[in-house]
Amino acid sequence: MSFYEIRFPINISYGSSGGPGFSTTIVGLDTGAEQRVSRWSKSKRQYDVSYGIKTFQDLQDVLEFYMSVKGAAYGFRYKDWIDFTTATDGRSSYEDDSAYVPLFTNSTGETIEDTQYLQLTKRYSVAEDDGGDTTVVIRNLTKPVKGKVKIAWWNTATSAFVELDENTLGGWSVNTTTGIVTLVYDIPDGVTVYGACEFDVPVRFTKSMDELLSVSIDTFDTGNTDAIELVEVIDHSEHFDEYFYGGSSTITVGADITIAFGQGRVIALDPDASGHTVVLPDPFSLPPGGPYFYLLNRHASYTMELSDAREEDDEHDSYASEGISGTFAADSSTTMWISEFSDGSRQWNRWDTNP
């Protein structure tokens, strides 16, 4: 189902309990040793909001909210009071310099004049004075709070952050439903772009809550409830019962076309001339990995071009990745994957093969 860009009452979430979790398979060996397999690359958060209900009005507010989102059918925003800003402690103001998180570094050797699409992120790691540290875990922030986002870069000459104005010519903008920042500023070589923000967690009511919201009335104006559980929504895109990644289709290409997953995993393309562009879905609409498509150019002479919904068909600026740039040769095939980079950006990548 869909997602409502509304926030669960913050006066109730303030007194709630919960936090992140992982899924790790632990296999014990006969020797007493063990093998651990991390099944999730990202954490998933769960909360119990019943602890935040202090008054009968709180109970009414939760009931009204529950009914409006139809139980577990629709997702919504939740403010996690333990971790709601990009600051290291999760609570300090996003306006402090310590809240800035690196999003992208220009290492191309020249100024980037093209529009950049950057994902707001937060980083988690532990470093000790004796040199011990942990791998940096990058968390994509898909629900930044409107009006509470800052973008800047580091000025090495003054050793200070330079905040980028979002209202000047060019400037930048942020999609508060995805956390994607559109940056129009020219980025000099060697410059790192930073972001800071407040953010919410996309959640829904759990399956057990979908079946019953158990409420009892103790007296005329007081009530009580069992656990009211929320779970983080990792992917809140809309999927229908007939949604199917498999299958195949054959498409006659007479002009530029956009392909979709409903057309199958294997798509045979038959162009009527050279130069038509095949547009793939937004790489941020799916998890990294794949393969998502196996494309075949069936014509013996006509070539095509590949792009995506963001028009990011060039190589990634900071990595040795060709993306999907280049011609889709005649009488050839390619497999399409989605790569995610350490700065949080994503890109389609192709693996050319022979049919």
Image (cartoon, rainbow, N blue to C red):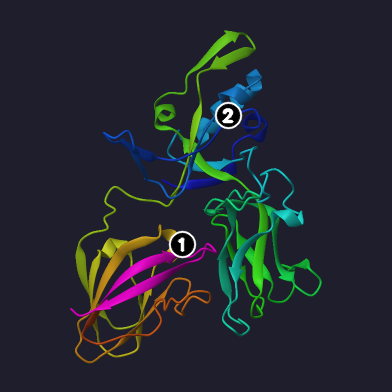
Magenta stretch bounds: 334-355
Amino acid, disc 2: Ser
Farthest right residue in view: 158
| Mark 1 element type | helix
| Mark 2 element type | strand
Above or below, 265 against 299 in this view is above
Q: Identify which residue, 279 or 326, lies in the foreground.
A: 326
Q: Residue at x 50, y 22 (%)?
A: 227
Residue 50 pos. (x, y %): 56, 24
Q: Identify which residue, 120 or 280, lies in the foreground.
A: 120
Q: Say if the magenta span includes residue 354.
A: yes
Q: Residue at x 60, y 81 (%)?
A: 112
Residue 45 pos. (x, y %): 50, 39
Q: Which residue is mark 2?
A: 17
Q: Identify which residue, 86 or 62, lies in the foreground.
A: 86
Amino acid, disc 1: Phe
Instruction: Determine which quarter of the picture holds residue 195.
Output: bottom right
Mark sitting earlier along the chain (2/1):
2
